[in-house]
Image: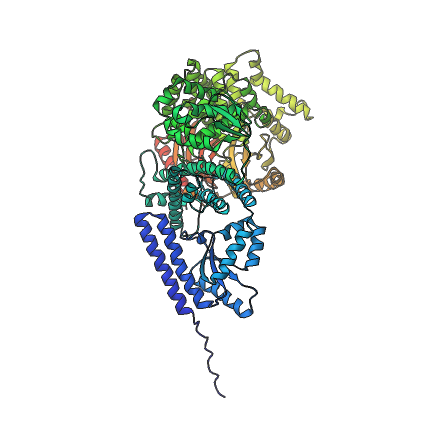
Amino acid sequence: MATPAPQVTPRNPNAGRIERWRRNLTDGRSRIRERFAERSDPRRSLSAQAKLVDEIVRAVWEDTVPQEDFALIAVGGYGRGVLFPYSDVDVLVLLPGAVDAAQRARLEELVGVLWDVGLEIGHSVRTVEECEAEARRDVTVQTTLLESRLLAGNRRLYACFGKAMQACLDVPYFVKAKLLEQQQRHTRFNDTAYNLEPNIKESPGGLRDLHNILWISRAAGLGGSWLDLARQKILTHEEVRQLKRHERALSELRVRLHYVAGRREDRLLFDFQAAMAAQSGLKDTAAKRASEQLMQRFYTTAKAVQLLNSIVVQNLRARVFPQPKAKPKVLNERFQVRGEHLEVRSAGLFERNPAAILEAFLLWQQHPEIKSLSVSAMRALWHARDRIDAAFRRDRRNRARFMEILRSPPGITHTLRRLNQFGVLGRYLPVFGRIVGQMQHDLFHVYTVDEHILMVLRNLRRFAVPEMSHEYPLCSRLMSEFERPEVLYIAALFHDIAKGRGGDHSTLGMQDARRFGRDHALPAEDTELIVWLVEHHLHMSAVAQKQDLSDAGVVAAFAAKVETERRLVALYLLTVADIRGTSPKVWNAWKAKLLEDLFHATRRLLQPGPESGEHTLNAKQERILAALRAHAIPETAHQRFWKQLDDTYFLRHDEQDIVWHTRLLNYRVKPESPVVKARLSPIGEGLQVMIYGHDDKTLFARSCGFFESIRFSIVEAKVYTTRHGYALDTFQVMDPARATSHYRDLISYIEHELADRLTQTGPLPPPIGGRLSRQLRNFPITPEVHIRPDEKGRDHYLSLVAGDRPGLLYRVARVLVDYDVRVFTAKANTLGERAEDTFLVNGEALSDPRRVVRLESDLIQQLQPRP
């Protein structure tokens, strides 16, 4: 029987050509990258990328689709003749009509070969009629098709396509749609415009704002370049120069980002910032990282682009939608209002009279009907901002106007934001100008310093708005009673103004605040309060979140620092506004309660009176017993349980917690098995978990390990040992990923599973661990551990700083077990990616200096970041 001949797989006839094209693309891209590294010229790089791809796409087209009546068209950014290193290559295959099976196969082969070569192709295959229908239906498609170039194929068909696109273009509709699209994009990306990982392309002030101007201009028949807009008197030649410079800066950043990321990426992620800064030739200084310098350049550029975009868009809108001139309403000899716009009454006003700059913003603030400056006023102000010099700042009229802005609460937030947007605030206050766009790589501030300051000021202003009183009732009440609230606004303006200079920013900021108060003739008492607030703006937060507020000495020391009720109220309001202005994730109900508790306790010391007797231990116990009677607990039922408690328990626990404990434990004072109960936390967020059982040195650690296993964060733990040797521990735990309704579902699970976990014996299980966040990988935090005795010398404070990650508290607890150190209270303060935890501890090891050193070393070892 004959052996069948082996089957031979036909060799791909295109394999050799594909390999050659791929090699040409790779080599060409390498040459472009090398030239960019040498010259940092984004225009040449983007143009060279497009030309390189043009050559390969044409070659593949001619080889696979030798169809003379088809047309291959570059569209979108590729159609503009620019291509970023890893951007998609968008092409349109234009058909004269229906295609047969053979032609369709050729087109499929074209796309397949282009992908094999290494091009990320975004393609569409349409007739002219289909293009027209899609453009009418979707303005995004229409925008893409408006930017087109013929790469290969039928010129006559391409000409028909161009005429059809112009014919279906409804200019007024297109312009309105692009302006609405920009407004929606700005709204969508508003929270990320000045955060620490902005989007170069989509954020306000990004490349898309520049593209939008040219799209509208092209559609309106005003030209497709900056020079065209200058010829049409839409732009001045100075504005053209600035726009080109900003476009180059943003394009250079995006090119570098693509190269560093090795993919199409538009977000300036932490992962790439350091490498991009190094490639830009920037170096770390004592005050600023190189990456911070790079990002400050981006934010400055984005701010300028936003403003120029506003000027040009208003000008384009006026050209496309001409309006009959309404009769102006005269405000004074310098300004008038026409429609919703503030106008200058004579050209060159700001150049002749720079003092009118602040006057314009004050009038804008005082007249709610004004929505914006007119194009001419906006442009004139932008070009005259350099007139704000030392003489301008010394002028009493300007100082008085600036104070009038701060003393006119309605619109103060918007006005200061406008002053910052136009670059006026940083020129009037040069110390503020130094922090515009300044990054904060502390991993819990998610905004630039200037944006954070304005967020804090906004929060203070919200306390004064009656419609917002439901958000923070205590803050709103205190704000409504606070005399001269401009003191708080000025303190907010200066509290972080010295960031990035090196040294203690609070001390440096004090000097700036004192100078401001003197220059602006503030009353001495107001200046001293502002200076004091700037110096101590972090103190209340530190005491509330790191010290034991049940210790009367802690509260007394804080009250001695504050001295007066006005200082206390001001510091409390500034602290709440400051924490809320760092990040949407930092503020929570637990921090709110700690600050409020410290505020009330301190206020009682500063306001001694007849009511102070209400806060004695006996009075507290009487109120607890009254609450128990309301729960139908028999009159003497508490006695057996309370006999096992000392005064420390009553001082360290809230009344409602003691009521809860007593209701659950009065009839089981000596249970054999651990009692675990959970409830929705009274603070309004998270769960409160009570553990009661035979005391064991591993109980706290096992509890921490359990919460780690279910991915819960412990924000506070109160650990107490009764007189008869039982542990009574109360944990406040949270999971930001879960809503309140999910917490309810977990209560039974926690009560059963944690009780079971606490009955286990043997060695403590190893930590589960977890991956470090991107932020911590790129900006690691060096762990710090400090152990110091308390004022009485009986117990010790253990404080630590480290990068936050799952199971951090459990790692610490395991080490403390090894050294037989007992925990009384634990406060886990998480600030974004930064953990600042404080413990009150006791143990024989803490009296031996050598063992303390070893304990600190072992703790640091556990806190070291692990990939």
Residue at 37% of width from left, 22% of height from top?
Answer: 392
Q: Which colour style is shown?
A: rainbow
Say which of 185 and 740 sits in front: 185
**How many numbered circles are shown?**
0
Say which of 221 and 678 sits in front: 221
Q: Is residue 671 visible?
A: no
Q: Is residue 734 visible?
A: yes
Residue 77: x percent and y percent? 45, 51
Residue at 33% of width from left, 56% of height from top?
Answer: 31
Say which of 642 and 222 sits in front: 222
Residue 443: x percent and y percent? 43, 37
Q: From the viewer's perspective, is residue 146 above or below residue 288?
A: below
Q: From the viewer's perspective, is residue 571 above or below residue 84?
A: above
Say which of 711 and 634 sits in front: 711
Going by the picture, which residue comes out furthest to the left?
38
Going by the picture, which residue comes out furthest to the bottom?
1
Residue 325: x percent and y percent? 54, 32
Q: From the viewer's perspective, is residue 578 above or below residue 556?
A: below
Going by the picture, which residue comes out furthest to the top?
610
Residue 96: x percent and y percent? 54, 63
